[in-house]
Amino acid sequence: MLNRAIILHAIVPVRTLPREQAEQSTQLLFGEQVEIIEYTDRWVHIRADYDGQTGWCDRKMVSPLTEDDIKQLRAVSWDAMVAMPITYAVSDNNGHTLPLSIGTSLPDYKNGTFKLLGVTFRIDPSMVIERPLELTEANLQQVCRFLHNVPYLWGGRNGVGMDCSGFTQTVMKLFGRKLLRNASQQATQGTAVSSLSEAQTGDLVFFSHRGVEASSGHSSVSHVGILMNKEVVIHCSGRVKLEAITDDGLPTHTLLAIRR
């Protein structure tokens, strides 16, 4: 059996263990490809191409790829992305609708259509960006205004439920910046910025929860957000929201690092 597969559902949960009750560690979006590490009767152990995250998916929710499929997908352009929290595509094959989340890459997109493995889909062009956006405060505000109040969901990276690093990973993808999946991993990327006074729009800010240092004796990255400007951060804590930031951090989080 080939060890490559693709996601043909809007969102697929990835779990830490091969059982329904296991914690959701992340999610896969339509069109994302994975390496198959191991099959069981019901579950499949995968490694995501996009960020290297591993975990377990329900076997019926991933679609194995043939060698011809793999060759075809290598020639596909994936520059276009869904820019709204949720939109819908319609299959020309059967007329069925497919919900798509923000950050979903659209293969061979052109003039409101995209094609994957021989099936053509139609989508509202106003819901799509055709190439990564320039990272400016105006563009960041435009993207994030549609995400305000999206609720926190552990392991979530879709337009109706995100965790803090799922939010940063999704938003920064629209600006052509590829992030790893978890806050502690993202804190290893980019270049350190010494202080808020030197920070810029789009820099990532990393935090620990207040009080953790006192109880544990050390600080570790447990939260991440995106700087809108030197005074405001947008992040997902309970929900996606804007919040004033100082050199000390946020009311509930201590500032640890800034990275560009």
Image: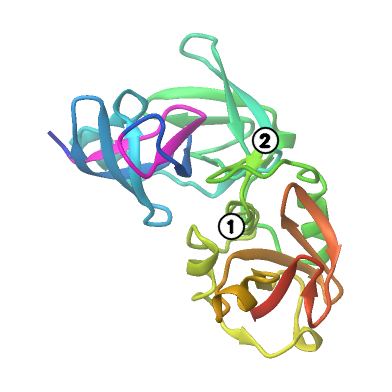
- What quarter of the picture does the N terminus occupy? top left
Numbered-mark total: 2
| Residue 217 % position (x, y) | 56, 81
| Residue 166 % position (x, y) | 58, 52
For mark 2, does the 10 Å Cα neighbourhood hold few (<14), some (14 to 19), or many (20 or more) residues? some
| Residue 137 % position (x, y) | 82, 65
Q: Is residue 60 magenta?
A: no
For mark 1, does the 10 Å Cα neighbourhood hold few (<14), some (14 to 19), or many (20 or more) residues? many
- Observer able to see residue 260: no
Residue at left 29%, top 36%?
Answer: 5
Q: Is residue 97 above or below residue 123?
A: above
Q: Secondary structure at mark 1?
A: helix
Check disc 2 and report the residue beneath it: 160
Q: Is residue 57 above or below residue 41?
A: below
| Residue 61 % position (x, y) | 37, 26
Residue most extreme to the top: 94
Q: Is residue 192 above or below residue 44?
A: below
Q: Quadrant of residue 135?
A: bottom right
Q: Is residue 11 magenta?
A: yes
Q: Amino acid at mark 1?
A: Ser
Q: Secondary structure at mark 2?
A: loop
| 107 relative position to 3: left or right | right
Magenta range is 3-18
Residue most extreme to the bottom: 194
| 57 relative position to 12: left or right | left
Residue at left 61%, top 42%?
Answer: 153
Q: Which mark is residue 54?
A: none
Q: Nearer the viewer, residue 104 or 158?
A: 158
Q: Amino acid at mark 2?
A: Val
Check disc 1 and report the residue beneath it: 165
Q: Quadrant of residue 58?
A: top left
Residue most extreme to the front: 215
